[in-house]
Amino acid sequence: MNKSALKYGFFLGCVIPNRYPMIERSIRDVFEELNIELIDLAGASCCPAPGVFRSFHILTWLVIAARNLSLSEELKVSPVTGCNGCYGTLRDVWYDLEHDPQLKMKVNEELRKIGKSYTGKYEPKHVVQVLYQDLGLDYLKDYIKYKFSDLKVAVHYGCHIIKPSIKRPWNKEYESPTFLDELVELTGAKSIDYKDKYLCCGAGGALRSGFNEVAADFTKEKLINIRKAKADIIITCCPFCQLQFDLGQKEVSNIFRDEIKKPFTIPVIYITQLIGLSMGIDPNRLGLIKNHNIKDVSPFISLDPFLKLIKKQLI
Amino acid sequence: MVETENLKIGVYICHCGTNISGNINIDLLKEYSSKISNVVLVKDYKFMCSDIGQKLIKADIESGIINRVVIAACSPRLHEYTFRSVCEDIGFNPFLFEQANIREHSSWVNLNDPEGAFEIAKDHINMAVAKASKLKPLKKIKVSVESSCLVIGGGIAGINSALDLANNGYKVYLLEKNPSIGGHMAQLDKTFPTMDCSACILTPRMVDIARNQNITLLTYSEIVGIDGYVGNFKIKIMKKPHYVDQIKCNGCGSCITPCPVICKNEFDLGMTSRKAIYIPFPQAIPGEYTIDMENCIKCGICADPNVCETEAINFNDKPEIINIKVGTIIVATGWDLYDPTELKQYGYGRYPNVINSLQMERLLSSIGPLSGNPARPSDLLVPKRIAFLQCVGSRYYREGGNRYCSRVCCMYAIKQARQYKEKYPDCEIFIFYIDMRTFGKEYEEFYESSQREYGIRYIRGRIAEVLEDKNNNIIIRSEDTLSQQLIELKVDLLILSCGLEPNIDSDKIGSLLCLQKSSDGFFMEAHPKLRPIDTLLEGIFISGVAQGPKDIPDTVAQAKAAASGASILMAKAELEIDPYYTVVIDQLCSGCKICQSLCPYNAIEFDDYKKKALINPVLCKGCGTCAPACPSGAIEQNHFTSDQMNSIIDIIKEDN
Amino acid sequence: MNSKTEEVLRKDIRKSYNNKLIQKFINAGLEEIRACINCGTCTGSCPSGKRTALRVRSAIKKALDGDESILKDKDIWFCSTCYYCYERCPRNIPVTDMIIKLRNIAVEEGYILDNHFDLAYNVFYKTCHAISAIGENNKKWRELRESYDLPSLPPTVHSYPEAVKECQKLMREVKFKQLLDKIKKKKKKDNKNIK
């Protein structure tokens, strides 16, 4: 297969474009470097978020998601998303409609009212799935220019990239998958083991928007375990988890001030930010070096300690 | 045809108490039946199978009023034999009788729909009458019976069947794939609920096997081929090479120490090692040595005459094929333990201090790796706090699990817990369970005493996940469902009470013998209540866990039942076989051999001289695969001829 | 089982659940929970239950027992949809989906957190994003986008007003908007809320 002929519809979602544009930049740049074409899904909406809107009204969740899927069908490509939440929605809806023809018919009835239709021909994918499965480690390793051998990474998968496993492409492995660790280790970094590595960040399921302090309690537990394991950095594959670890880290340090003693300052970046860096993409573009004076924007936790660590390996 | 003119069919409708009459209007059904052509008589009775019911039929046949019998009653699987015998008793050909099943097929399945049930009953009677009109008298086949039995599997089930048969005077071949008989029972330390030492009650039986003149022990052997039929099975067996002459070897064991190869000891589930030359366990029968060629490096040290004085080592040993002929076969292939590796949340295979129940059994065993002083694998310290998890892989409706309950795990966990407490009275023991099932004789009492006297603590909840801390302790997360509290419990050792699965080789044996399996993967019995040890193939019996999970008392009972079943067959010099076989009409057969390739019982031969297919009536099970496949319509099946089947189909066609 | 018998059986099951709420649960497919053996794997696996009062097994059981209080109970909103309960259930019951369905029924009955309502009504329906970059408040995010060499608004609904119209039309067609309006009215009137 000619891997450089691959193309996908880029499904942005909400958090990536509107809060973590450096993730969008890094995905676009890494894919370009890999000669993979990303076509924008013009007019795509919220996926809709599987925690909140699915909890409110399943039918709304289904039809809006089907509309988003139909946008990539019009372009005859699989949609690819960098967000676990969007992936959860697009993939679950795709799976559910494939397994329930009656429901599919009903959803199409609604879509017809706005002049759209949905077939289910194109499998929704995650950025990580494209990197790991469609391209593969062997293919990627030729693009790696810099290796970060001293870097200790705490990998955070998040939930919806692996579960429900029956609707995911990872051979029903949900207790201890390794694909993200393998991608991280491609850059020479060491993915360290830590307690409850596969635990949820706490943001999902409408929890962050509903009960921020409960979400923060999840995050606190993760951060304590990550700090105990002496990780230099957290790598995510979901902007919502990233938000929870980044902005949430500040919230945790604030809410649980007495309990945790020392505030948390663990840098958090997205997988394509790390891979992009090791592929030699300008760290300014990847959002690893601050290149603006805008206040109170992401990343909320400084990445400087991380940059310091890997500096000599970049030269 | 002439016969048609003389047809006089009697229809007998059974009420079966109220099983049929409670849901179907018998008077209307009688009225309907009397109008079917060729029916000369319709009678009903409360129980057709009763003495009075039988006499009713006999009288009508003997007086010549009828010459075909249709009985509308229960399933032919229950009473076909009864009514056939009624016919035979008075010298009437039993194959001129047909049974319509209006109980299982109509009354019972339409309990809420009497009208529907009535319609279906009408159809069944109509079809039976149609077929009865085409019935032909048939004769049963007689075959001789070889007075010998092959018992497959040398565990406690096979051992008991073999001993009973041998003591009854029959020749027995006891086949075992491993170098020793004894099966899983040899691995157990004690047995519930009486706490007898497993080896102490098993080994005398093993010795009996070795000493019994009527038993030929075929250990380290496998079946490679089977041919023949009830009373006359021809079996090809491969004796695997031991690379040690089993006659010369005196079992002295001098070869063990010098052997440089260390490999995993399967008898201790890999917790200890053994040499490449070995006997499986000290009380093994036979007690001669075997070289495990997968691991042997052929250094030749053991073959040195200074090491093996009897010069028994033979690196040129070859597999040996032997052929035997037996009248009956008992399948006692037993079980394997469920492998919990895939249930990753329990950490088996990842955390050293999570073990399975058979490993625990070896740890507890006085002849086990730690001489009966259990310690945990990671550091050989004595665990102060241990937990058991029940239903591992059982009652599990996901892929890779078993839906059934294995019936022994509750009891063996209680037993192991009690044993452990006896060894270390100050330890703490937790058993995580969903339901405790202690249903056997003295089992509930055993459970109660484990609570009252031994202080074993039962937590109602299935462990959700398991973690390991840096000292290899196990952290259990679970809900205590009775208090609805989430618990996190640190223990030193976790034992997974895994369920039983059909032996890994039972598939192979099953397909060689053409045995059917039930949905749980175990061999299927001919009837779940009344023929629990018979298979659908005459002359082949199942015994022990091969049929389904069971404990030792039940296994032994079934083993003895299987021996009894085999004896009954072998006690007869001749057997009668129902004449349902297929026949080739020579004039039509084109010799294309399609039937031969399809026959699942290898019953079809090819007559090279006549260039026609030839069906062995005894091997043929009347499955009907060949008849419709024959392109020239040259195959007819007795009692299910095209003519007969078409007459039934015509009825259905008319009906619609 | 023939279809008539099945029908009778089903009727019997439903008869035993005669209240309106239970009917709703059953229609939403929650009756699958009948096969539950109450082993506690779901609750034991629940990372939220470790820090909140959410007891997954008990919550769904309550629902099927017709206990309406579960709808007002904030506990059911503590689930982070991590799907461990769904994955590990030995009876293959899609537990997480059950919680989602339970939440749907709660919302239908008017029980929704203010934050969630605000998100649905003022952000999602209006912008068709769950987190938006429009408006004066979000200026810094648009600038941040530009600093990464990206257009100030992404090529999503934010750049295509007609796409927003499409999505809103769908939300009206499936009666989501109407549901939100109803809840808004109710919230004003009886201050109905989650406890």
Image: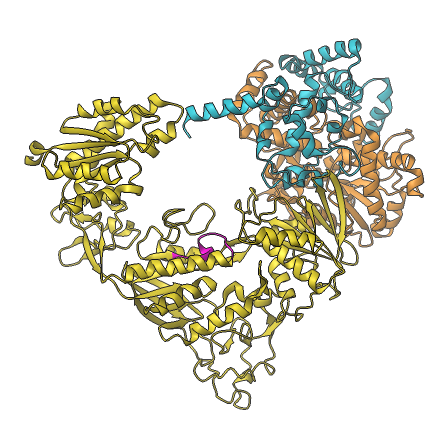
Chain colours: A orange, B yellow, C cyan
- Quick check: B623 left or right of C77? left
- Quick check: A308 left or right of A81? right
Give the main secondary structure of the magenta stretch: loop
Residue at x-position 90% and y-position 34%: A255
Residue at x-position 39% and y-position 64%: B151
Q: How many marks?
A: 0
Q: Position of residue B379 (x, y in %)?
A: 75, 65
Rendered position, A18 above or below B167: above
Q: Nearer the viewer, residue B339 or A65?
A: B339
| Residue B166 visible at all | yes
Q: Which residues are magenta?
A: B542-551
- Quarter occupied by the C terminus of chain C: top right
Rendered position, A272 above or below B307: above
Residue at x-position 42% and y-position 60%: B559
Q: Quadrant of residue A252?
A: top right
Q: Is residue A115 magenta?
A: no
- Quarter occupied by the N terminus of chain C: top left
Q: Position of residue B383 (x, y in %)?
A: 74, 61
Q: Residue furthest front?
A: B52
Q: Is residue B544 magenta?
A: yes
Q: Nearer the viewer, residue B154 or C106?
A: B154
Residue at x-position 60% and y-position 71%: B263
| Residue A39 visible at all | no
Q: Quadrant of residue B320?
A: bottom left
Q: Quadrant of residue B330?
A: bottom left
- Quick check: B97 left or right of A46? left
Q: Position of residue A129 (x, y in %)?
A: 65, 40
Q: Position of residue B456 (x, y in %)?
A: 70, 53
